Image (spheres, rainbow, N blue to C red):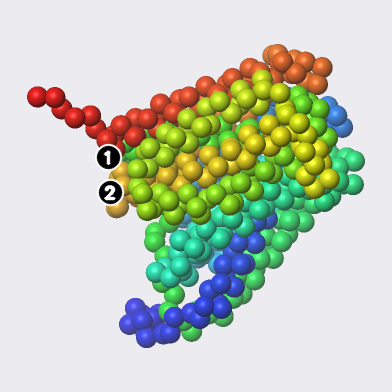
């Protein structure tokens, strides 16, 4: 269809655009649930299948290995086959990965399943972002992205809540993973509904052409300035701390603090619930005030003592939350971590657009995401090695301290880079 003909078409009605948002967000909801479904079964994999700490760590990291492979391909599939086909394809890959993960107790089979999930999950996120840019370009785009992210994070929180609403399934390791497969089925169904809806809209409405999908162009890496690489370094250590901790947190709360499986899952979900509420608020604040380097520094400074507080502070008096006894100190810390998980990314990702030339933005984001996945893949292997070396467990709670100090060290490195970004925002005056 020619550009002249496209401009002559009417814009899509609001009801169509918001229905599209629902379908895309449901696809993301299932995607996030599948990734986080491993955390609640860590203790069962140890007790039922005798998986070691190192094996658990690899199951978490192998997702990132798949994601790295997918990111190296970049947006080629999305550009070649279109967003509607790409969304359905990547959702189907995640579904296949979920099936393979749940189907067998053989360790190599389960690891293969998690690898396949990684192959589909990250490109699915790129496809969803591209779709929203196409349908909401110039109209409520920030609101659409915010709603999409909130619904996606509900997928993560729901995986944690499954220890409560699906507690009978946690009598064995396999049934919770089959539940995750069902949620992956919701993702595929939503992606197919979107495919059908966009197919009907083609030729009827003027759809904005989305920006080019992020691709990694190696020759452009040499054109990025120091500020960009500071942002990348902060991104790597921040996400390499947050996501691995979440994956191990339920098992940690059970072993180190004696919480029930249900209470541990609910406590872990509090970080995502806090983030869902805080993300749009921090986004609006930073858009209004600016000073992204300052906010990243404040976020890292707030995060610095958190893991040591979890380790060494008394858990606090228990309070009843949805029928579960949750220690107050741990609850406050997880809520604060959720705020940090909102504050730092809200300042971090937009900062890239101010640090690099607009023509290289795709490469900048693709490179940053690739580096993020590499760092994220290494940390679970290190933490599980530290836990194994120190015989961490319910009978030796102190053995978990080394891993928590490691998380703290990563946060300190992030604080250094955040401070450098803040200083770059406010260079010292020259004394003459």
43 vs 212, left or right, is right
Residue 144 pos. (x, y %): 51, 64
Callout 1 secondary element: helix
The residue carrying pointer 1 sits among few (fewer than 14), some (14 to 19) or many (20 or more) residues within 10 Å by Cα, namely few
* 3D distance between C-alphas at marks 2 and 1: 9 Å
| Residue found at x 50% / y 53% | 281
Residue 175 pos. (x, y %): 85, 46
213 vs 148, left or right, is left
- Nearer to us in this view, 368 or 298: 298
| Residue found at x 76% / y 47% | 161
Residue 39 is at least partly visible in this image: no
Q: Which residue is mark 1?
A: 223
Name of the residue lying farthest toward the top:
390
Residue 125 pos. (x, y %): 55, 54
Q: Quadrant of the C terminus?
A: top left
- Nearer to us in this view, 120 or 415: 415
Residue 120 pos. (x, y %): 60, 51
Q: Are marks 2 and 1 in contact (CB under 8 Å)?
A: yes
Callout 2 secondary element: loop
Residue 9 is at least partly visible in this image: yes
Q: Which mark is residue 84?
A: none
Mark sitting earlier along the chain (2/1): 1
| Residue found at x 59% / y 28% | 306
- Nearer to us in this view, 176 or 222: 176
223 vs 206, left or right, is left
Mark closer to the observer (2, 1): 2
The residue carrying pointer 2 sits among few (fewer than 14), some (14 to 19) or many (20 or more) residues within 10 Å by Cα, namely some
Q: Which residue is mark 2?
A: 357
| Residue found at x 61% / y 23% | 308
- Nearer to us in this view, 360 or 231: 231
Quarter residue 252 falls in: top right
């Amino acid at each position: 269809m020619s550009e002249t003909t496209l401009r002559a078409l009417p814009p899509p009605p609001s009801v169509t655009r918001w229905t599209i948002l629902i379908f895309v967000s449901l696809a993301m909801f299932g995607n996030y649930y599948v990734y986080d479904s491993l955390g609640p079964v860590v203790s069962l994999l140890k007790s039922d299948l005798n998986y070691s700490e190192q094996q658990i760590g690899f199951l978490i990291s192998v997702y990132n290995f798949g994601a790295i492979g997918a990111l190296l391909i970049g947006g080629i599939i999305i550009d070649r086959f279109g967003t509607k086909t790409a969304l359905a394809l990547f959702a189907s890959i995640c579904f296949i990965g979920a099936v393979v993960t749940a189907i067998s107790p053989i360790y190599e089979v389960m690891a293969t399943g998690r690898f396949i999930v990684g192959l589909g999950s990250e490109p699915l996120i790129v496809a969803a972002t591209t779709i929203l840019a196409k349908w909401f370009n110039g109209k409520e785009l920030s609101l659409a992205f915010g709603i999409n992210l909130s619904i996606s994070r509900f997928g993560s929180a729901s995986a944690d809540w499954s220890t409560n609403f699906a507690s009978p399934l946690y009598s064995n390791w396999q049934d919770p993973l089959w539940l995750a497969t069902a949620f992956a089925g919701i993702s595929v169904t939503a992606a197919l509904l979107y495919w059908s809806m966009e197919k009907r809209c083609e030729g009827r409405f003027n759809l904005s052409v989305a920006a080019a999908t992020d691709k990694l162009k190696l020759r452009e890496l040499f054109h990025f300035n120091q500020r960009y690489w500071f942002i990348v370094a902060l991104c790597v250590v921040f996400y390499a701390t947050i996501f691995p901790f979440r994956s191990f947190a339920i098992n940690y709360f059970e072993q180190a603090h004696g919480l029930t499986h249900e209470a541990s899952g609910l406590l872990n979900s509090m970080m995502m619930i806090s983030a869902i509420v805080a993300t749009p608020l921090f986004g609006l604040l930073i858009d209004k005030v600016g000073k992204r380097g300052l906010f990243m520094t404040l976020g890292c400074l707030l995060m610095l003592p958190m893991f040591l507080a979890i380790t060494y502070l008394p858990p606090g008096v228990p309070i009843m939350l949805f029928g579960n006894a949750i220690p107050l100190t741990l609850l406050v810390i997880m809520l604060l971590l959720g705020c940090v998980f909102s504050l730092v990314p809200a300042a971090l990702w937009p900062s890239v657009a101010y640090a690099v030339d607009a023509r290289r933005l795709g490469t900048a984001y693709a490179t940053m995401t690739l580096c993020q996945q590499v760092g994220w893949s290494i940390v679970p292997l290190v933490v599980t090695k530290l836990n194994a070396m120190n015989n961490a467990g319910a009978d030796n709670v102190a053995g978990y301290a080394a891993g928590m100090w490691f998380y703290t060290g990563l946060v300190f490195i992030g604080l250094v880079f955040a401070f450098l970004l803040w200083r770059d925002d406010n260079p010292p005056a020259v004394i003459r």
